[in-house]
Amino acid sequence: MKRHHKMPFGAECRDDGSVRFRLWAPAARRVELILTGAKHSTSIPLEERPQGWFELITDAAKPGTQYRFRIDDAQEVPDPASRFQPRDVHGPSQVIDPEGFDWRDDGWPSHPWEEAVVYELHVGAFTPSGKFSALRTRLDYLAELGITAIELMPVADFPGKRDWGYDGVFPFAPDSTYGRPEDLKKFIQSAHNHGIMVLLDVVYNHFGPEGNYLNSYAPQFFTDQHRTPWGNAINFDGAASRAVRDFFIHNAIYWLTEYHFDGLRLDAVNEIHDNSTPHFLTELAEEARKAIEPDRHVHLILENELNQAHHLRRSKQCKAELYNAQWNDDIHHALHVLITGERDGYYSDYSDNSVARLGRCLCEGFDFQGEISLYRNGQTRGERTTGLPPSAFVSFLQNHDQVGNRAFGERITTIADPRAVRAAVAILLLAPSPPLLFMGEEFGTESPFLFFCDLEKSLAPAVAAGRRNEFARFARFNDPAAREGIPDPNAAATFKASKLDWSDLAQPRHQEWWKFYRELLKLRSQHIVPRLSGSCVMKANYEVQESLSLSAHWEFPDRSKLTLLTNLGADAISGITIPHAQMIYASKEVNDNTLKEGTLPAWSVVWFLES
């Protein structure tokens, strides 16, 4: 089976063997195609078209041909819609024929979102070689663990040999450090053969600081009417924004169709600024869903600091009209405060009533639903979540941000009591909301995950200084001298330290962690997932029984009832009412005697299910 998303820009292979090149360059007077050969280069002018477009159809290029565009007889630039950059961000683009890959997973229906157990990973740090091809060797492992969806951190071409991926500059080109486009397609196909979905993290709020040439010939891509942490915003609502919106909408459809990804996670959409109607996020979701076969499950997930619940609305049939879910930072922050005691920085908003905040997240999704955030200088944050199912909120104890945005990239097992970590994991993996794991957490890895990049020498010092200054609001790093000890993101050693150490799995304590996660995911698959389908209307409530004791209750459409009892403190709590229902999970500290006495030991979790 062939999969080819035909785009109105970039290099498109045509049925007659020619290649069509198209570039939006509204600030250019003249554009030439430069074909790079082994011994010499060929220059062919593009014809000017209305509204800033330049176009050429030629049989002088074919799949594998490397090319650039020359702007106004001066600067040579890669194609912003390049499907592949074999020599990194400053090198030539390469013509790729998507129909050169023969897909063999046309019977793959994907999974309903309610079945999602997401495993987030960084391609370069997950395996020793850091290649797409190496990911395939771990699919049996992930399937056995109980993972139903792999989420790749961004793979769009970035500068240098290592990067988190959020500073990519060629959104359509898988980074050559990881392999070629067909290597990524082979991985996705193999994942589907293992019954695992593959999701991709995409960045539509900025371009990285190195390798982005758009300002030189298409400054209309950006606007000074809105500002982001990276400078002028992407132009989604100003003059000439139609071409910009189409660029990113086609990018989403491209990954979902040509690469057969099962979904996308949109990074930090709170930094996508658009005062027009329809909002860019609405248009993107609507157009992406129109482009997908009606019987195929495709999932769109947001990261959105603003907690805008309206993006997650459901139809009367409980289908996601726009986005399936949002990463729920609130539940992470509340749990993190409870099990680590850390309360500075953005954790300050969760330092009071932490157990109640956790309960609200478990039963309602967001904690902040219009309340004032003191950390955000008194601004209100969030919208009401009434009518949204638990599947609209992705829960996690670790992810790339919450580990990697720590100064030293510490894993939760190195900063919290292992009993507390086990309790938090037992809560998240059996609660109705879809859980997300970050690579290695399932075997209790102690390998840090640090912020790393490989920028040119002129940018590297500023990035290192900026990284260190981010922590000035944390008490531990008030002193500039303390911040100097934070690892340099550009150092190769920083990336090397962030690679998973798979030899840990040979050690008994790491095997114990893995078995613990596997047991919980089996229980989730057996008892929780079958009850989640069509669960838009679900009664849920919680009670704080003692200062650190929580009970939470859910009633599913089939009238079965799920109950959580937990003690998130270091001392036992008595006087707890125990439900008359089947116990499906209990921490190892819990036994028949403690339950008869109505006692919850320190850091304990018990789950009950009444069918």
Image (cartoon, helix red, strand yellow):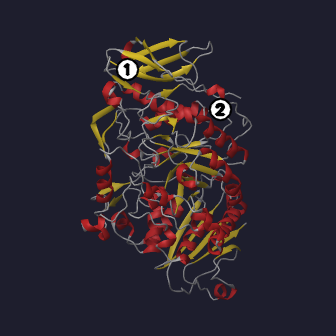
Q: Secondary structure at mark 1?
A: strand
Q: In the image, is residue 478 above or below residue 33?
A: below
Count numbered badges in the picture: 2
Looking at the rendered structure, the kind of residue marked 2 is Glu
Question: To which quarter of the image does residue 352 belong?
Answer: bottom left
Q: Position of residue 288 (x, y in %)?
A: 55, 33
The residue under the point 54% across, 24% down is 95
The residue under the point 46% across, 33% down is 248
Q: Position of residue 88 (x, y in %)?
A: 46, 36
Looking at the rendered structure, the kind of residue marked 1 is Arg
Asked if marks 2 and 1 touch (Cβ < 8 Å), the reply is: no
Would you call the spot at circle 1 few (<14 residues within 10 Å), some (14-19), or many (20 or more)? many
Q: Mark on residue 293?
A: 2
Where does label 1 land, which residue?
70
The residue under the point 38% across, 39% down is 207
Left or right: residue 447 compared with residue 211:
right
Q: Secondary structure at mark 2?
A: loop
3D distance between C-alphas at marks 2 and 1: 39 Å
Q: Position of residue 401 (x, y in %)?
A: 44, 56
Res 365 visible: no
Q: In the image, is residue 207 above or below residue 407?
A: above
Q: Position of residue 592 (x, y in %)?
A: 69, 85
The residue under the point 36% across, 55% down is 381
Question: To which quarter of the image does residue 582 belong?
Answer: bottom right
Q: In the image, is residue 124 above or below residue 402?
A: above
